[in-house]
Amino acid sequence: MAIPLLILSFLTIFIAYKLFQRLRFKLPPGPRPLPIVGNLYDLKPVLVRCFTEWSQIYGPIFSVYLGSHLSVVVNSAELAKEVLKDNDQQLANRNRTRQIAKFSKNGMDLIWSDYGPHYVKVRKLCTLELFSMKRIDALRPIREDEVTAMVESIFKDCVKPADCGPAGFNLVLKNKGKALVLREYLGMMAFLHITRLSFGKRFMDSNGVIDQQGEELKGILNNGIKLGTKKSFAEFLPWLRFLFKAENEALAEHDARADSFTKKIMEEHTIARKKTGNTKSHFVDALLTLQKEYDLSEDTIIGLLWDMISAGMDTTTITVEWAMAEMNAPSDTADAPHKANTNVKIGGYDVPKGATVSVNAWAIAGTQLSGKTLSSSDREVSRGGHRHEGDRLSATSVRLRPAGVRPEDMDMMEQPGTVTYMRTPLQAVPTPRLSADLFKRVAVGNV
Ligand code: HEM
């Protein structure tokens, strides 16, 4: 008896709240939401395509309910400017999923923090210290090392001798003319680069063997993806979260595992600094030596280190893969969703406090709905009048060499997900044109 009554009460409260919102606010139009689940069942896997279709039905600004949570999506350059420039500060909060809330200790990092004194402080730290030109230059040898290591591994794989036949006789190159999956090489390069930059360590030896700590790190990353992609009703029905005990425990366990991994690394660097008196340029040493000056809690240091891992790894791989596929599509197809910290008006409609606001960059750049793209100065004002943090680093870590593959021969569809990989990984046939010694890795120690 108690459970049906409980469900009935929730339903009544939900419907009353929705009615109240409808009467109080002039919300953007959108697909009709069902009670409780909202539009969850209307969504198609590749969100940016789905949103672009909806923008053609409902107009350049529409509402979509993810469960009971209101999300507003804008699909034109004019409205993007209203979100990212005119109402920047009012929309500079973040909507944290359960996993993200746990992992970021409720926004104690940069990416997931709400706009306020903490955000301003860590943003300043990132701009002046972590991403200063001086530090980015000092970390250049790591980038060069990892790019040459990737080139070497592509070279080795494409001139791999076949196992058959006695060595030296009838040498057959096993992979000659064979297409290699670029994402595997790019992904490994991005992993080694960003983890070295953040954690100050190369987790792979010169024979390509990942050490125990590296395996643990990969385990944490894979588990994070598994937890993050698992669809759960608890995500969309906050008032029922207490019922999902096993899921909550899995999130807490994952968080504790990542914390203990990171604390161990921090400890190792603290011991090394004391022993040698030498502070390196990587982010762990930088953050630990700046901890007092910027009044950083341990949670913030850990959060910032993981921000770099999550923001800098897939994005770099995806950008190069799409660019090599000669696709004129931005890899950040939808901007990281913003959250209203007060009631705001966008495009003449109300966006109530707490609603999520997404800019569908794919629609704007790809289909030019408005006939006008977002200018770089409009884009730069996002989140408190500053530029995207990784700009200096992403510009230095990505060097493109477009493959001469005909676009009509390729599957240019996107894979569903938070970040937009190509559905079919790009393959290319590498042909060495220079002498073998020019493909050798130029290894450097940690800097
Ligand atoms: C080509 C590669 C990259 C792309 C396409 C990309 C894209 C993005 C996007 C769309 C955002 C959200 C901006 C917003 O909230 O409006 C973002 C934020 C961020 N990115 Fe990148 N990113 C790239 C590389 C990197 C790298 C290499 C790093 C650092 C190692 C990095 C660190 C960050 C950080 C810390 C933020 C949060 C900024 C904030 O909330 O204030 N990114 N990135």
Image (cartoon, rainbow, N blue to C red):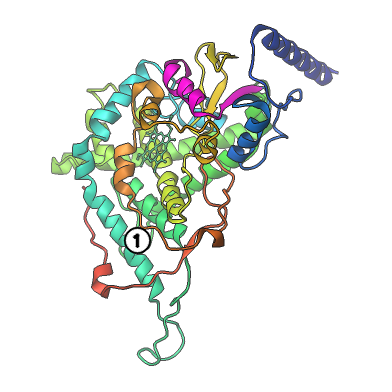
Residue farthest along the right direction in this orientation: 1
Q: Nearer the viewer, residue 134 or 278?
A: 134
Residue 105 appears in the figure: yes
Disc tally is 1
Residue farthest along the left direction in this orientation: 277
Check disc 1 and report its element: helix, strand or loop: helix
Where residue 131 sits, quadrant-wise, is top left
Where residue 130 sits, quadrant-wise, is top left
Q: Is residue 116 above or below residue 234?
A: above
| Residue 315, percent from left and from top | 43, 44
Q: Estimate how packed mark 1 is, as few (under 14), some (14 to 19) or many (20 or more) residues with alpha carbons within 10 Å.
A: many
> Quadrant of the image for the N terminus?
top right
Q: Nearer the viewer, residue 107 or 275?
A: 107
Task: Write down the residue under mark 1.
Answer: 150
Where residue 8 sits, quadrant-wise, is top right
Q: Residue at x 32, y 66 (%)?
A: 152
* Amino acid type assigned to the residue bearing label 1 in the image: Met
Q: Nearer the viewer, residue 303 or 387?
A: 387
Residue 93 appears in the figure: no
Is 371 covered by the magenta stretch? no
Whether disc 1's CB lies below 8 Å from ligand 1 is answered no
Is 70 covered by the magenta stretch? yes
What segment carries the magenta color? Answer: 69-93
On the picture, is 397 further left or further right than 413? left
| Residue 135, percent from left and from top | 21, 39
| Residue 424, percent from left and from top | 56, 57
Q: Is residue 368 above or below residue 358?
A: below
| Residue 370, percent from left and from top | 53, 30
Ligand 1 image position (quadrant) = top left
